[in-house]
Amino acid sequence: MATNIVNKSHLQASCSSKQSHSSKLSKPKLLITRPEPQAQQLASQLNLAGYQTLCQPMFAYSAAANQSQLSQVLNTHQPSIIIFVSKAAVEWANKILPLSAWPTATTAITVAVGSATLTALHQLGIKQAICPPQHDSEGMLALPELSQVTNKNILIVRGNGGRELLANELVIRGANVRYFESYYRQWHEFDPHQAQQWRSQGVTGIIVTSQALLESTWQLTQNGTHSEHNNNFWQNTCLWFVASTRIAQLAREYGLRHVICTHGASDQAIITTLNQLESINDN
């Protein structure tokens, strides 16, 4: 099944297919699935831009149980490279031990997965942090700083769970890798008919900024929807805004037809993509 993904020509194709049913494509009402407070922050920005939003966080952040281990990990592992895989990883790690007080704060190579994570590090005084052009594990692995890592100690700061590609590849390259989970995700439970409520509330677009969020949200659109019309809406009509080409590929495998890649999980990346979509529609 054809899927509209990522670039301007695909955005134009998506708009054209919808405009065959309407003289002008209206702004989508957007479901925001990321946790608070990021969900409300994004909603506020989108509201200012004229978009209706509905915040439905799929999970909440909570403090990790291993907080007391951070100092020990830093002192024993003595990482020369520290990788933060999300803005939340930065913020929760800083709550446990201010980043400026980390033993290698000024000497370690600090890598941020994306622009929002990079900004969080800069705001906490880690000015030397770097970020790949492609905001995912593959992008970080392409950095020159991570190409020659034999016998180097690397610390990956993240939440519980997540992809293992980054750590596995760094180990293959000869690095000594350790994780520190600075926060936990507490996934919410939803009524099986939750997606039907979204339909009744007028949702026509969904923003997902991670693979786990896509999996959770997509599953809700499949559960308890006894109406073929509802199923066809999420698959064939709804706009799915995703943060990376990898997530877009998974969305394609789910059979979602209108997938638009924002090339980043930051508020600005999402708003820029929406502005591009609106500009194409206006033309």
Image: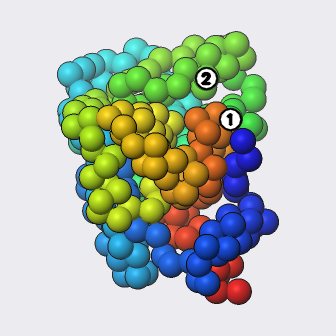
Quadrant the N terminus occupies: top right
- Under mark 2, the amino acid is Leu
Residue 129 visible at all: no
Depth check: give the residue in front, 219 or 6: 219
Q: How many marks?
A: 2
Q: Residues within 10 Å of mark 1 (few under 14, many from 20)?
A: some
Q: Which residue is mark 2?
A: 165
Quadrant of the image containing the C terminus: bottom right
Give the answer, above or below, for where 259 lies relative to 248: below
Q: List x then y, in percent, for residue 192.
A: 27, 35
Quarter of the rendering containing residue 46: bottom left
Secondary structure type for disc 1? helix
Amino acid type, label 1:
Glu
Q: Are marks 2 and 1 in contact (CB under 8 Å)?
A: yes
Label 2 neighbourhood size at 10 Å, few (<14), some (14-19), many (20+)?
A: few
Mark toward the start of the polypeptide (2 vs 1): 1
Checking the image for residue 53, the label placed there is none
Residue named by callout 1? 138
In percent of the image, x 59 and y 83: which residue is there?
Answer: 24
